[in-house]
Image (tube, rainbow, N blue to C red):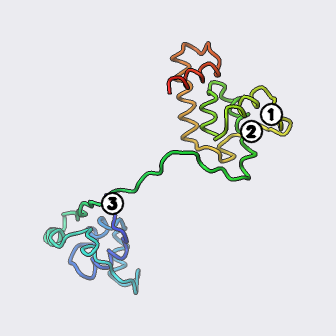
Amino acid sequence: MASPLMPKATAVWLVENTTLTFSQIAEFCGLHELEVQAIADGEVATGMQGMSPIGTHELTPEEIKRCEGDPKLVLKMTPRDLPGPVQRQKGPRYTPIAKRQDKPDAIAWLVKTHPELTDAQIAKLVGTTKTTIAKVRDRSHWNMQNIRPRHPLEIGLCSSKDLTAAVAAAAKRKAKMGGGDKPAEAADEEQSAEA
C-alpha cells in the first residue's frame, strides 16, 4: 500500500484531529504503532505541524468517519488520478572520463570469462564499439601491454542484472544453435541481421 507524502506529519494530524486507533494510523502512514503512540504522548515530532491528508487528497472525510466507527477497519488511500513518474528512455549512458580508460580491461575480462557473449552484447554492456572489442580480442589494441582483465562490476561499467541477463541470453542462444558451432562473430552478425 502506498504511504502518504509526509507520513509523520500526516500521523501528527490524524492523532490530533481524529479518534482513530494507533494501529490504524500506523498502518496508513507506514509507521510503527509505538511511534504513533510516542507522537500522541509528545515524545516524538514535538513542534511538528500536522499535515491534513484531506487537504492533500490522500483521504476523504467519509473514509476517516468510516474507520473511526470500527477500530478493525483499515484506512484506504484515495486513488490518485495523477500520472506516474515517466521512465527515462534507454539511450547511451554517460561514462566518466576516469572510467573510460577501464573499458578495455572490462572487455578483456568478458572475452576471457564469457567467450559465448557476442560483440554486440559486450558493446551494450560496457558501452564501447565493436572495433575496440575486436582489437582487444585479437590483442592488437594500442594499449594492450597495460590491459589487465577486470570484472566490469568491479569497475562500475555495468550492473549485475545486465551482465546476468546477457550471459543467460548467450547461453540460451548457444543451446538453441546446438552447442555453439559458430564463432561469436558469426552469431553477432546473425543477431544484427535479426534486429
Query: Residue 123 placed where, x, y %?
Result: 63, 35
Q: Is residue 192 left or right of residue 39?
A: right
Residue at the right extreme of this rendering: 145
Label 3 Cα neighbours within 10 Å, binned few <14 / some 14-19 / many ≥20: few
User: Which of the two discs, 3 and 1, labels the residue nearer the N terminus?
Assistant: 3
Instruction: Identify the residue shown where x is 72% and y is 28%.
Output: 134
54 with respect to 36 (left or right):
left
Q: Nearer the viewer, residue 10 or 135?
A: 135
Residue at left 50%, top 23%? 194
Residue 32 location, x and y as percent? 37, 67
Which one is in front in this view, the residue at disc 3 or the one at disc 1? 1
Number of numbered discs visible in the structure rendering: 3
**Which residue corresponds to mark 2?**
104
Q: Secondary structure at mark 3?
A: loop
Q: Residue at x 37, y 78 (%)?
A: 38
Of the image marks 2 and 3, the number of the one nearer the N terminus? 3
Q: Which mark is residue 141?
A: 1
Q: Residue, x 72% and y 34% (percent of image)? A: 132
Question: As shown in the figure, which amino acid type bears the numbered disc 1?
Answer: His
In this rendering, is residue 37 above or below 156? below
Label 2 or label 1, whichever comes before in sequence order:
2
The residue tagged 3 is 2
Do the CB atoms of the residues marked 2 and 3 lie less than 8 Å apart? Answer: no
Tag 1 secondary structure: loop
**Residue 25: quadrant of the picture:** bottom left
Q: Which callout, 2 or 3, points to the residue nearer the camera? A: 2
